[in-house]
């Protein structure tokens, strides 16, 4: 397994130089304590914890997995102790409300921590990460009593949280779910049903688990309009906050899965378990979207995490592995062969991983700033714009970053040749662990429908314009920057084409709704490349300015410009294919009769 090193230099470049987090925090009324010194200390200490505590457990988690013994899940050796250390150091409370025991620091600081936890040990990182969605849901929709009972324990990390949506007979179509909620005389409800694919649904690392569960009240409307949301704790809390009495919640089995073996993916059975309504009857899906959006942004980080691991491992290997001679002449005459990093195709793979990972990091940290503004800004217009733009970008973050993250993990394995297929190098685990990212929290296809159908077309393009205006202003501001024209001209043309392509799909969809579904995934991927084109152009601008000022890190900044050039010349042309697929329409997908697909 490659030794993990937190990419602190690139994180600081994005955070401090590209996005100017210090100024951002100075303008937030809730971020007065997030000084540059504090932010940097958090970065350094989080890196130590992830490198020294979590990373060594990554392979352990994969090899040992979780075990269901007597209805209880045992996590891999060292996981529980690492979590205790995590809580003792105060990491769970970092970016949460002081009123409920948090440290009150900005949400974006928590994103940096989440990225490093994912890079060092994604399976472990899922245990505390899922609590974030439960916290956001309860803080937004819970009663004050619920907040004092559950939120304080979740914020401290003493308890963890889950999201329980999916059932055996329905996946994304939550309107089909059957879990029932029966009202009781004391105001509670009895929850009965089964949920599947519940990450961290049962484990031994925290004293209690707070399940956030979708269920249906008797007589509720059909479909998603009849769903309600409930808090269902594993142990029922006493008046003093202790949790000793076991609720009617149990793990029926553990899923046997391709990767992330260190995290327990559970079938959860609710047998008249006591639950407590959140957000009012039949308002469950609206409340749950708070959790789901937090989870989707977090899942986008998984693409970055696996890309970073792929890059670190593949780069080390490419520098050390001797094989063949460079086609343009011997580069290392003192060795029997040249290291494979001299070969153009190996560089193609390394640069693809680098371009996607570093570009996505800039994209994710930009999105984290929007979350800060949506949560804390006192300027109503600024807050509304941040929310609009965040709604538009969230499905792109989730789907594009995980699709390209999987590509990166695959290329990282490919760089090793046959050795990449052998477990000792860690690349095959990285690929297996990464594969789930495009599936959970809504598949790529679901995210694409949400983006094109719900976010773009239903807003008549307003959500798209919230971001294309950012690109337009950037291009206009850099119009006279001669050094940047290799990026500005194609970016401006792409930005214009993005709007035109959207209008074409919208016009077709007025005649045939299937045009939305037919175009959606290609539209999302096109949008992802357009977003990264903007961030790479801005990173090239930042690097040029640093070089002009004079710096001792010329290599670092030149590499940024060269990677931007690689992205524009080698990866951005993929938009041409996506555009052609979109314009081909729905007929080539829907014209064939179902029977003509063939017999099985």
Image (cartoon, grey):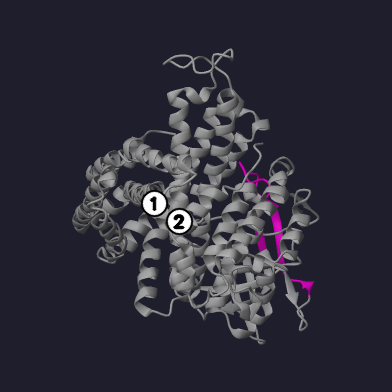
The segment highlighted magenta reads 243-269
Q: Is residue 352 toward the left or the right of residue 79 in the image?
A: left
Q: Say above or below: 242 vs 319.
A: below
Q: Is residue 236 visible?
A: yes
Q: Is residue 431 visible?
A: no
What residue sits 60% from the left and 52% below the top?
116
Q: Which residue is mark 2?
A: 17
Q: Is residue 121 toward the left or the right of residue 449 in the image?
A: right
Q: Report the number of discs.
A: 2
What residue sits 49% from the left and 57% below the top?
15
Where residue 38 appears, as percent x and y from the top left, is 60, 66
Q: Which residue is mark 1?
A: 542
* Disc 1 crowd, CA 10 A, few/some/many (<14, 14-19, 20+): many
Q: Quadrant of residue 600?
A: top left
Real-space Cα distance between discs 1 and 2? 7 Å
Q: Quadrant of residue 502?
A: bottom left
Q: Nearer the viewer, residue 419 or 559?
A: 559
* Disc 2 crowd, CA 10 A, few/some/many (<14, 14-19, 20+): some
| Mark 1 and mark 2 residues within 8 Å of each other at the beta carbon | yes
Residue farthest along the bottom direction in this orientation: 185
Helix, strand or loop at mark 2:
helix
Q: Nearer the viewer, residue 14 or 69?
A: 14
Q: Is residue 48 magenta?
A: no
Q: Nearer the viewer, residue 569 or 466?
A: 569
The quarter of the rendered structure image containing the N terminus is top right
Where residue 491 appears, as percent x and y from the top left, is 27, 48
Q: Say above or below: 563 vs 254.
A: above
Where residue 188 appears, as percent x and y from the top left, is 64, 81
Helix, strand or loop at mark 1:
helix
What residue sits 40% from the left and 64% below the top?
390
Q: Say above or below: 227 vs 194.
A: below
């Amino acid at each position: 397994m490659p030794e993990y090193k937190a990419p602190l230099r690139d994180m600081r470049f994005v955070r401090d130089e590209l996005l100017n987090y210090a100024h951002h925090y100075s303008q937030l009324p809730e971020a007065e304590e997030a000084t540059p010194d504090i932010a940097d200390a958090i970065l350094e200490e989080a890196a130590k914890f992830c490198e020294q505590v979590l990373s060594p457990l990554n392979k352990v988690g994969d090899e040992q997995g979780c075990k269901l013994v007597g209805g209880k899940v045992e996590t891999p050796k060292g996981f529980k102790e690492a979590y205790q250390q995590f809580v003792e150091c105060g990491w769970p409370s970092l970016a949460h409300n002081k009123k409920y025991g948090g440290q009150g620091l900005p949400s974006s600081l928590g994103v940096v921590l989440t990225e490093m936890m994912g890079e060092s040990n994604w399976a472990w990182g899922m245990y505390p990460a899922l609590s974030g969605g439960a916290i956001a849901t309860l803080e937004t929709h819970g009663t004050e009593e619920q907040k004092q009972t559950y939120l304080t324990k979740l914020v401290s990390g003493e308890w963890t949280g889950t999201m329980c949506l999916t059932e055996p007979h329905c996946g994304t179509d939550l309107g089909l779910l059957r879990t029932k909620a029966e009202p009781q005389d004391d105001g509670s409800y009895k929850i009965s049903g089964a949920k599947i694919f519940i990450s961290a649904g049962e484990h031994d690392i925290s004293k209690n688990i707070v399940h956030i569960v979708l269920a249906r009240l008797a007589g509720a409307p059909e479909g998603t309009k009849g769903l309600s949301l409930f808090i269902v704790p594993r142990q029922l809390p006493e008046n003093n906050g202790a949790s000793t009495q076991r609720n009617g919640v149990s793990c029926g089995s553990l899923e046997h899965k391709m990767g992330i073996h260190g995290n327990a993916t559970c079938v959860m059975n609710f047998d008249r378990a006591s639950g407590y309504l959140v957000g009012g009857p039949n308002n469950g899906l609206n409340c749950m979207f708070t959790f789901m959006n937090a989870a989707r942004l977090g899942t986008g980080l998984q693409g970055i995490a696996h890309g970073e691991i792929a890059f670190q491992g593949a780069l080390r290997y490419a520098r050390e592995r001797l094989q063949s001679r460079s086609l343009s002449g011997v580069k290392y005459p003192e060795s029997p062969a040249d290291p494979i990093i001299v070969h153009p195709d190996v560089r193609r793979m390394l640069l693809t991983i680098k371009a996607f990972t570093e570009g996505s990091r800039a994209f994710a940290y930009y999105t984290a700033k929007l979350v800060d503004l949506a949560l804390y800004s006192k300027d109503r217009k600024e807050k509304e714009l941040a929310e609009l733009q965040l709604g538009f970008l969230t499905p792109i973050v989730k789907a594009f970053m995980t699709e390209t993250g999987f590509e990166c993990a695959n290329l990282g394995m490919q760089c090793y040749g046959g050795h990449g297929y052998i477990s000792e190098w860690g690349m095959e685990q990285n690929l297996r662990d990464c594969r789930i990212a495009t599936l959970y929290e809504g598949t790529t296809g679901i995210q694409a429908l949400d983006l094109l159908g719900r976010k773009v077309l239903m807003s008549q393009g307003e959500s798209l314009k919230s971001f294309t205006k950012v690109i337009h202003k950037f291009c206009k501001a850099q119009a006279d920057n001669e050094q940047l024209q290799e990026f500005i001209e194609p970016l401006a043309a792409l930005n214009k084409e993005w709007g035109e392509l959207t209008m074409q799909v919208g016009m077709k969809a007025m005649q045939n709704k299937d045009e939305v579904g037919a175009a959606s995934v290609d539209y999302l991927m096109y949008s992802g490349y357009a977003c990264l084109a903007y961030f790479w152009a801005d990173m090239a601008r930042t690097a040029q300015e640093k070089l002009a000022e004079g710096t001792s890190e010329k290599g670092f900044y030149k590499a940024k410009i060269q990677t931007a050039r690689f992205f524009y010349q080698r990866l951005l042309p993929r938009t041409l294919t996506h555009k052609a697929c979109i314009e081909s329409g729905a007929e080539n997908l829907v014209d064939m009769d179902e029977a003509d697909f063939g017999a099985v």
